[in-house]
Amino acid sequence: MCAAYTGFVAIVAPTVVRLPRGYVRVAGPGAAEFLERMLSNEVQVLGEGESRQALLLKPKGRIIAPLRVVRDSNEAFLLITEPELAEVVSGVLGRARFAAKCEISVAPLRGYLHLADPGRGVRIGDFGVDAWETWEEAELDAAPADELERLRIEAGTPVWGKELDESVLPAEAGLEETHISFTKSCYPGQEPIARLHYRGHPNRRLRRLEVGAAKPEDEIRFEDKVVGRVTSAVPGRALGYVRREVPDNATLSVGGQEARLD
């Protein structure tokens, strides 16, 4: 067990940790079919209580919002996203709904991460450890969200506003394997996503780095050339986008310090 994880558990277990989240409900007899044609992953096949990650995309394949889709019931879904994106998601879906028989609304819920199974919510792997995410109407006694930052970085999980924004392609952030189905029917952004997947590759990739100290926007250098920038950092670890041609065993420089790809 790594020292970071041991230290984290000692601090927060058996408490819960706050998760900054936004929530959108989509409910009605046409909800499943509507979301299936709007999102990048297959959600119509989800059973009650099951979840799957997906993306809401622009027609050119850029990210509007990362989502975790939970099927609450046969005709109701909860979309979990970043707190600043709930209104955006609700608005985009609302404008695309047309005659679909469903209602779309932002839900005033609070998000929490549990290191022990609370008997509700969904199991997630965003932090590299066994954990469960729940959404509650009531306020719970919980540790602050920044307690999770080291685990998130070590797991290589991107978040909106740091690794993700409207300029990022899903393949650059490593979201193809977790958020996209290449066998489902059409959805906004499908054509450019499929074209890059089958015929090309992204010019940069989100990578984990071992570095003594770094901060967001630090240049990542290889052989005196800037090959990327840091997006998130904690002592000893960082995330950043790095040019694809940089070898995995390269010795890099970040803020004048030696760094290596993890």
Image: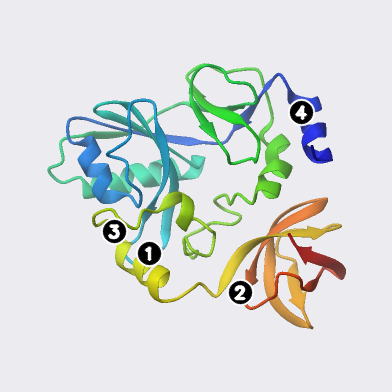
Where is mark 3, residue-wise? 188
Image coords of residue 80 (percent x, y): 44, 37
Amino acid under disc 1: Gly
Q: Residue at x 18, y 36 (%)?
A: 30
Q: Is residue 224 placed above or below 141 in the rendered structure?
A: below
Amino acid type of the residue tagged 2 in the rendering: Arg
The residue mark sitting in front, 2 or 1, is 2
- Tag 3: Cα neighbours inside 10 Å, few (<14), some, or many (≥20)? some
Q: Which numbered marker is on residue 61?
A: 1
CA distance separating discs 2 and 1: 20 Å
Secondary element under disc 4, as helix, strand or loop, is: helix
The residue that disc 4 covers is: 9
In this rendering, does residue 214 appear at all?
A: no
Left or right, 25 with reference to 119: left
Question: For the residue marked with disc 3, what is the amino acid?
Answer: Pro
Residue 27 percent across, percent down from the top left: 26, 30
Residue drawn where x is 39% and y is 30% of the image: 50
Mark 2 = which residue? 244
